[in-house]
Amino acid sequence: MQISLGLMLLLVTPLQIQAKALDSWAPILFATVVSKDVPEQFIGEWALDTTVCGKGASESTLTITPSSIMLYASGGPVESVEVQGDDQVSISANFHGEDGSAWRQTMKFTLSEAGTRLERDDTDGVYHRCADSAYSISVTP
């Protein structure tokens, strides 16, 4: 049986196009990992003002543990974590405020290349890693 070159191109080309389309979508489809554990590089005490590091909770501190997130007047257990690479994570937690209120909130964090600065999507400031913290980890620049 002979198949003409034109017919072969008709048969092969759609498969190649589909394969290329899947290749271009694969990083988007498979890049996000969902878990309940915060990745180690995000764990620690963070502060907008480093002079408050190690002095307990203040309005500029953020503490992230493997299973919770704590701000000055609120905090709670982590419900889910979406990891979008080594330097980005979205953390959903069930927060409780000091006034008794409760809500679920998702915060997206971006870690600097050196692992010493942390940006939060819903604030303008940049958090700095507190070196002497119960939750600090060794970071090599």
Image: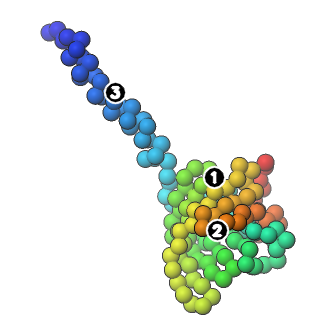
Front residue of 92/5: it is 5
Residue designated by label 1: 87
Q: Nearer the viewer, residue 100 or 9?
A: 9
Q: Position of residue 67 (x, y in %)?
A: 60, 69
Q: Are marks 1 and 3 in contact (CB under 8 Å)?
A: no
Please rate how many residues cluster around mark 3, counting C-alpha atoms within 10 Å: few if below 14, some from 14 to 19, many from 20: few
Among the two numbered marks 1 and 3 on one chain, the one whose residue lies closer to the N terminus: 3
Label placed on residue 123: 2
Q: Quadrant of the N terminus?
A: top left
Pointer 1 local density, CA inside 10 Å: few below 14, some 14–19, many at least 20: some
Q: Quadrant of residue 135?
A: bottom right
Q: Residue furthest bottom?
A: 99
**Which amino acid, mark 3?**
Gln
Asked if residue 59 is positioned above or below residue 140 in the image, the reply reads below
Asked whether residue 40 is in view, the answer is no
Mark 3 vs 2, N-terminal side: 3
- Image mark for residue 16: 3
Task: Determine the CA span between mark 1 and mark 3.
Answer: 33 Å
Question: Is 3 on the left or on the right of 66, as rendered?
Answer: left
